[in-house]
Amino acid sequence: MTRLPRSLASRLMIAALILVPVTLGLAAAYLERAHRDALDAAIAERLQLQVITLLAQANVTDDFDLPLMPLEARLLQPASGLYAMVSSDRGETLWLSPSAAFLSNPLERLSDGIPPLSPGTRFDNELGGLFRHAYQVLWEREDGSEVPLRFVVAESSAPRDADVMEFRSKLILWLAAMLVIMLSLQLAIVRWGLTPLRRLAERIQQIEAGKAAELDGDWPREVEPLVGNLESLLSGEQQRRERMRNTLADLAHSLKTPLAVLRSADLHAPDFGSLQQEQLDRMDEVMQWHLQRAVGANHRLLQRVEVLPVLERLRSTLLKVYAARDLEIVVATEGDARFRGDERDLMEILGNLLDNACKYARAKVRARAMRDEDDGLRLIIEDDGEGISPELRDTLLGRGARADSRQEGQGIGLAVVMDIVKAQQGKLVLGDSALGGARVELILA
Amino acid sequence: MRLLVVEDDARLRARLVEHFRGNGWIVDEAPDGQEAQFLASEYPVDIAIVDLGLPDVSGVDLIRNWRSAGLNMPVLILTARADWQDKVGGLEAGADDYVTKPFYLEEVEARLDALLRRVEGRRRSVAEYGALSIDFSARRVARDGDAIELTTYEYNTLAYLARRPGEAVSRAELLDHLYDRDSDRDSNVLEVFVGRLRRKLDPQADLRPIETVRGVGYRFTLERRGA
């Protein structure tokens, strides 16, 4: 199968190259047909007038008679292109115009193929290069008897054909000019219409080259969502890079302290073993802390992850992990509960919060997700444990504390959740649950 | 208990094997998924430790293969990555619990004990069988509160039987679960162990905790109390 061209402009131009000639071709066929029909109708009318003129001049006594000088001079002039004949109902030719003198087989050419007609009816057709008009009359003689007569007037179709040919030539010329104009206009429209995309590509190239930082400027309505998403991705990437840099810097900073303690320790001191163990534990904790924080990403592309499947997967996982404690874990969502972002982040948030809840619960843990009135996502995780005292809440939320100076008792899990929530410009609230224990509420965009 | 350790890092694997063998476990070891697949299909593994980052097949795939082959032993996964996506992936594949690296060997052992307790339907590590009590974590046995000194093989034999009270366990099964694959398996040795065990547990022959099932093997006769 032939592949479609990758360029939008090529696609639009190919479509125009097919569509415009087809449309113009159809229009040309219609115009030519209409012109020809109009000419034919005019000829038929003219011939009808000729018949009426002949009827006016005819004189029917015992014989059929027409004056030597009919009103139409062309009927007297041989090969004038206008011919006439009058015949009886028996097919006997009563009168043939002198103009048909040099016409080959004039009687056949004027009368062949004309069906029997009832009086007062007419018949038009084109045969052998002649337009023929037949008119059947019932002539009442002076004695009251009636004579059926057929008047046939014919005209050469050559002038009409010449007219049609001329019209066709002019039409083709005009339509060719129109085709060129329309395709040129189409090309200009395509270029104009795709200008914002070209500008966007150039802007991205500038960003790649470090010559620009963002996709600022006025963008058409159709391109705006794309620009918005790209802006989001770019700023997300920038924040991610910054976050990685900070994480690595924090990690290095945090590891250097226990390393310094170990390096400066007395290898022969009796407590060197316990000191070494203590510092190794500290380094492990520091690493876990920083690595888990690095998981959280903060791009806000349009990807939306359904919350319920993630909650259900975590529920069955935690039921396995805490199988010995017979915990009841209830998960539920209301309405269209979807998380805008990465499934990994959602799992990290819910995994850490549910794990904490399971750790401290007596028997029951409940997780709910719903959309709030501002179309944000609300996640509520509750347990029936002892709850968190108001004094501890501030400590746990690490208010005013440096990112790497975690307080005693603050699990890595909650801190990681807070990092992701912060990156999402969300909110985390600690409170009391109706179940009797802690309630963690998250509000995310 | 026959433990299979699947870990590609030779040092870490050696430490795990050394630790558990030192604590009386029968340990098989595999450095990769292929060897682990072979060992699990050839030997009756009671419990397994699987590192998720194996060189040939992933730990998750290995566990999935075991489960689809009908191998239902508890599996503890070791993972260097502590994010939930990995934990959930491992547990969904059929693992029963996880430990993140680095870990203390005691923590791993405690998790294995907890998994075995879960399989056996016990809540606590100490199981009471009337006058007899067995602490499966500390590997201690007491009668009426008095500790009884048992050798590793004696303890392993008793623990294996006591985990399935009332069930007749064949000699072949006992040998499979109590001996290394390289050991000389002589069922006479088993009889000697059981004889010594009976004398230590029941010197007056008034409790009769282990009875011989003719033509089959042995049965632990005492009922477990509580959970």
Image (cartoon, coloured by chain):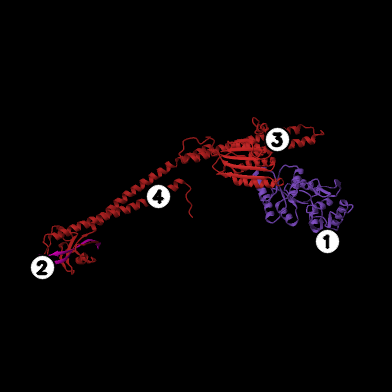
The residue to which callout 4 is attached is: A17
> Looking at numbered disc 2 in the image, what kind of residue is underneath it?
Asp
The CA distance from mark 2 to mark 4 is 71 Å
Labels 2 & 3 near each other (Cβ < 8 A): no
| Side of A334 relative to A292 (left or right) | left
In terms of secondary structure, where does tag 1 sit? loop
Q: Position of residue A387 (x, y in %)?
A: 67, 37
Give the purple chain's letter.
Answer: B
Residue A62, which numbered label?
Answer: 2
The reply to whether residue A76 is visible in this rendering is: no
Magenta span of residues: A126-150
**Circle 4 or circle 1, nearest the eye:** 1
**Circle 3 or circle 4, nearest the eye:** 3
Q: Quadrant of residue B65?
A: bottom right
Labels 2 & 4 near each other (Cβ < 8 A): no
Q: Earlier in the sequence, mark 2 or mark 3?
A: 2
- Asked if the magenta segment contains residue A142, the reply would be yes
The CA distance from mark 2 to mark 3 is 136 Å
- Chain containing the residue with disc 3: A
Q: Earlier in the sequence, mark 3 or mark 4?
A: 4
- Asked if the magenta segment contains residue B108, the reply would be no
The residue to which callout 3 is attached is: A409
Q: Quadrant of residue A330?
A: top right
- Chain containing the residue with disc 4: A
Q: Earlier in the sequence, mark 2 or mark 4?
A: 4
- In depth, the one of A61 and A118 nearer the eye is A118
- Chain containing the residue with disc 2: A
Q: Position of residue A368 (x, y in %)?
A: 60, 42
In terms of secondary structure, where does tag 2 sit? loop
The CA distance from mark 4 to mark 1 is 95 Å
Labels 3 & 4 near each other (Cβ < 8 A): no
